[in-house]
Image: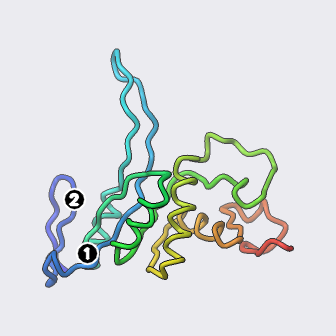
């Protein structure tokens, strides 16, 4: 595919009309609120332009979801989507798969964990396509009772394992 680059995103030239593209809902990243001058900025939900570009280049129509705890909203997201994408980001909290060893909580994002664990459960229930990268792959493994580890030197077992019991 040949495309053009704009100041913020890649616009591919594909032979698929926008209305005919599969709708790919993308789970957002979560950026904490930060101070700016005399005020505190609101937290942000966002997706990386490279993720959007890849979906567009593949002929999909990316649309960002909003993080929510409402399972009915999550189910509706899954129902209307042709596929779901979960990008990388902070670590998934190891407590989610039963690892109680000390872990630096600043490396995790509980807001995303809570939303995305429910989201993956609904995607699997609906048997919809799920694309994940990095954090998303670890999260998807965790929802199925598997454990993914970015640093294999910390494991005394295979990289992916099903918990006993």
In this rendering, position of residue 1 left or right of residue 161 = left
Q: Is residue 67 above or below residue 59?
A: above
Q: Is residue 32 above or below residue 85?
A: above
Q: Position of residue 19 (x, y in %)?
A: 16, 77
Q: Residue, x 35% and y 66% (percent of image)?
A: 25
Q: Position of residue 79 (x, y in %)?
A: 38, 73
As drawn, the label of residue 72 is none
In which quadrant of the rendered image does the C terminus lie? bottom right
The residue tagged with tag 1: helix, strand or loop?
helix
Could you classify mark 2 by the number of other residues whose Cα lies within 10 Å: few (under 14), some (14-19), or many (20 or more)?
few
* Foreground pick, 91 / 155: 91
Ranked by sequence position, the earlier of labels 1 and 2 is 2
As drawn, the label of residue 57 is 1
Q: Is residue 43 above or below residue 97?
A: above
What is the distance, in whole Å, between disc 1 and disc 2 at their CAs? 11 Å
Give the labeled residue for mark 2: 9
- The residue lying furthest to the front in this view is 72
In this rendering, position of residue 56 left or right of residue 136 = left
- The residue lying furthest to the bottom in this view is 15
* Foreground pick, 7 / 15: 15
The residue tagged with tag 2: helix, strand or loop?
loop
Q: Which colour style is shown? A: rainbow
Q: Position of residue 78 (x, y in %)?
A: 41, 70
Q: Are marks 1 and 2 in contact (CB under 8 Å)?
A: no
Q: How many marks?
A: 2
Q: Quadrant of residue 17?
A: bottom left
Q: Quadrant of residue 2?
A: bottom left
Q: Residue, x 16% and y 80% (percent of image)?
A: 14
In which quadrant of the rendered image does the N terminus lie? bottom left
Q: Position of residue 88 (x, y in %)?
A: 49, 59
């Amino acid at each position: 595919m040949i495309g053009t680059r704009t100041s913020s995103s890649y616009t591919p030239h594909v032979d698929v009309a926008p209305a005919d593209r599969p709708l790919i809902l993308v789970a957002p990243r979560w950026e904490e609120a930060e101070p700016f001058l005399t005020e505190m900025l609101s937290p942000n939900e966002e997706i990386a332009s490279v993720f959007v570009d890849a979906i567009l280049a593949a002929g999909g129509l990316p649309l960002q979801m909003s993080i929510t705890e409402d399972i009915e909203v999550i189910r509706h997201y899954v129902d209307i989507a042709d596929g779901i994408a979960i990008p990388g980001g902070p670590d998934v909290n190891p407590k989610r798969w039963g690892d109680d060893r000390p872990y630096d909580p600043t490396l995790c994002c509980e807001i995303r964990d809570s939303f995305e664990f429910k989201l993956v459960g609904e995607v699997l229930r609906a048997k919809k396509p799920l694309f994940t990268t990095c954090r998303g792959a670890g999260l998807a493994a965790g929802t199925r009772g598997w454990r993914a580890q970015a640093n294999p030197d910390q494991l005394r077992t295979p990289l992916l394992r099903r918990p006993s019991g």
